[in-house]
Amino acid sequence: MKTRCRTTLARALAATALVSGGLSLTLCGIPSALAKSADNSAPATEQAPHQWRYYPNPPEAPRGAPNVLLIMTDDVGFSASTAYGGAIPTPTFDALAKEGIKYNAFYTTAMCSPTRAALLTGRNHHAVASGAISNLATDQKGYTSVMPASAATIGRVMQMNGYATAFIGKNHNTPVWETGPTGPFNHWPNAMGFDYFYGFNSAMSDQFNPQLVENRNPIEAPENDPAYNLDRDFSDHLLHWLQVQHTVRPNKPFFAYWAPGTVHSPHQAPADWIARFKGKFDMGWDKLREQTFERQKKLGIIPANAVLTARPKGLPAWDSLTPEEQHVAARMMEVAAAQLAQCDYQIGRVVDWLKKSGQFDNTLIIFIQGDNGASDESLNGANDEMASLLGIEPTQAELAKTLDIHGGPLGFGNYPAAWGWATNTPFQWGKEIASHLGGLRDGMVISWPDRIKQHDGLRTQFSHIIDIAPTIYEAAGITPPAKVDGVVQQPIDGTSLVYSFNAPNAPERHRQQYFEMLGNRGYYKDGWFANTIPEIAPWDRKHPPVDPYKFKWQLFNLRDDYSQSHDLAAQDPKKLAELKKDFDAAATKFHVYPLGANLMTRFAPSNRPSLLAGRTHFTYYPGDTRYPENSFPSISRGWTLTAHLVVGSDEARGPIAIGGNHSSGFGFSLENGFPRFFYNPTGRDKERVILGSDRPLDTGKHTVSVHFQPDDAAGARASVLKMEIDGQPVASASVPVTYRVFGYTYVGRDGLGLLFAGQQRGPLSGATLTSLDVDTE
């Protein structure tokens, strides 16, 4: 498996350099010669391209078409950034707002994969089978997570129209059962129309030890680079790609989609960035919200008559926390702020280069600050987000104990839900809640100096994530094709926003829009908004099932009530009935039904296709392959792992199989000839189990097995973990809870590099793993 510094792109660029006269290219980081003066490679005059008789003539972009840089961050609340009144400095985002325009009524779908599917296609999320995140896909037309060929992405359409295309960052739109080493690859970014992809295929990624993909090839971050972090890596790769495009094909416009995982959990940032925010959030979430609200009014981001909505039931008041609890919570917010600020800096590096290379004025930059509202998925915060997703909330003592590692390479955390609520000011609720503006509204800035003449302007027209694709098409002078790759295309549901670029008071053209996520729903029509009332808080993973068809409805006039604060359902039942009927019509048209509100039920793997379905025995072989969850059976009661080994030294050591992530998972290894097995499903000390033989393996062939045997007397999830060598029992231990393992599994190597102190990622030494059997009941 390649490292970050030995990418296929770098090798191809090095070859290009030799052919084109010895340009100095650096395989790691930014090419120095290109960085000095990208303009030097541009021709003095443009010439009409030569038309070949028999060679295929590549597509050409419309004359004067702009470059397009589309940026979308992750889980950033409406009011997180300083451009929208927040406390987290985002000078790049702010500068683009001052050079262009910002929108204060821009809506997403309230959750990740659906927003990204709508962004990439210009269609409603259920219309492209993305009614929930891909991890919650179900066998219903609007929810399979398999985006249809009838909804080509922006990448494919721009590619067909003469654009160079790249996708850097998070891809959460490949069905989970297709993310493994054997594909299929027709829903991976390259097949979506992107010439180049560098990022990760999952909901989240570790900032210090990401499991990356370059095009279709797995990539590991460097082992011995203490300065490494993912956002800087993304910036390096996008800069590199842009610079090469500008050198080799300066007349060909680019479309670059940059989707950093910031600030989705895990919240992590370089230590020096975290230090900048020490003490900055000691005022607490209630005061932060009040201060943000006042700044928003002074900036004119929100109307003067806007109301600051109340804290949702279930979130604690800051003053109700003990001093120690406040200290822990404030530190968690410091980490999240550092992550967003550092990401903004990395984005700034690319914007600066566009200016230095003379491309900025004719580059349409659309910067969407968040794919939904800020996260409110962990009530008290967590240092192991995966445990929180299982409904395991840490105690305050556990949070305090792990505070020093929060935000660093050994942390995998999220902040308390109330910080998410505070960075969604002035709205109610947050991520997952499609019935309220805290989950739906995000900041968006658009800059295009050649075409947008007003600077630091505000646009208040209703705008939605499905409007971005048609906006790009109109700006580029492209008519969306009726067919793509022979497939008739379904209608684009969005409305171009180009009309608003130089007309701040133009009547809005996107006049109606439905919303739905996990049963929470709403309908917008000419300033009116009807919505259901949430019955399950996002942080409540143990709530009993609810019936979304019985949710109660509210009604708001957003023209007069910007923050959705005054329910008019009782005063105007006729209008509410009208919007409910409109919702039903849209829901029927776009495949929203049947509704499902119970996240933990939908999370069950049995809801989705699986490469493992119907099988109970699997054989794996050592190598560089990275197996995602859908390609390797996860630990459960009755799970057995058997290693077939040939030992050649009494000092044999190294990994046999490693799975999960660095805060929870399992590890099977040899340590100086002694078999060892480590298991921790939650990242907490009380669930950690280490099992091993008291004697080393002799030289020769051996089988070493570990087996999770149900122990119903000790609890519904309890097991007895047993180890056998050559069929003979050698050790056992009690396992208090047995959970599935999230993350990747490696056979014969440690791709995580963190489960065993001092152990390298490389293969076994002093022994050979011939095969690994996994059996499930």
Image (tube, grey):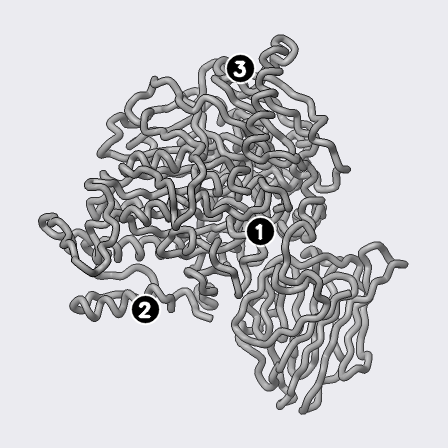
The percent position of residue 439, horizontal first and vertical second, equals 55, 32
Q: Are marks 2 and 1 in contact (CB under 8 Å)?
A: no
- Residue count near mark 3 (Cα–Cα under 10 Å), binned few <14, some 14–19, many ≥20: many
Residue at horizontal 65 percent and vertical 69 percent from the top: 667
Q: Which residue is mark 2?
A: 11
**Location of residue 63 in the rendering, given as x and y in whole percent from the top left corner:** 19, 41
Between label 2 and label 1, give the one nearer the viewer.
Answer: 2
CA separation in Å, label 2 and label 3: 58 Å
Q: Quadrant of residue 405?
A: bottom right
**Real-space Cα distance between discs 1 and 3?**
42 Å
Amino acid type assigned to the residue bearing label 2 in the image: Arg
Q: Residue at x 67, y 51 (%)?
A: 387
Q: CA distance from mark 2 to mark 1?
A: 37 Å
Left or right, residue 433 beside residue 483: right
Instruction: Classify mark 1: helix, strand or loop.
Output: loop
The quadrant where residue 620 appears: bottom right
Q: Identify whether 461 is placed above or below 767.
A: above
Residue type at numbered disc 3: Asn
Q: Work out whether mark 2 precedes mark 1 in sequence or the reverse, and give the earlier one.
A: 2
Circle 1 is placed at which residue position? 406
Q: For the view shown, which residue lies furthest in the top direction?
A: 571
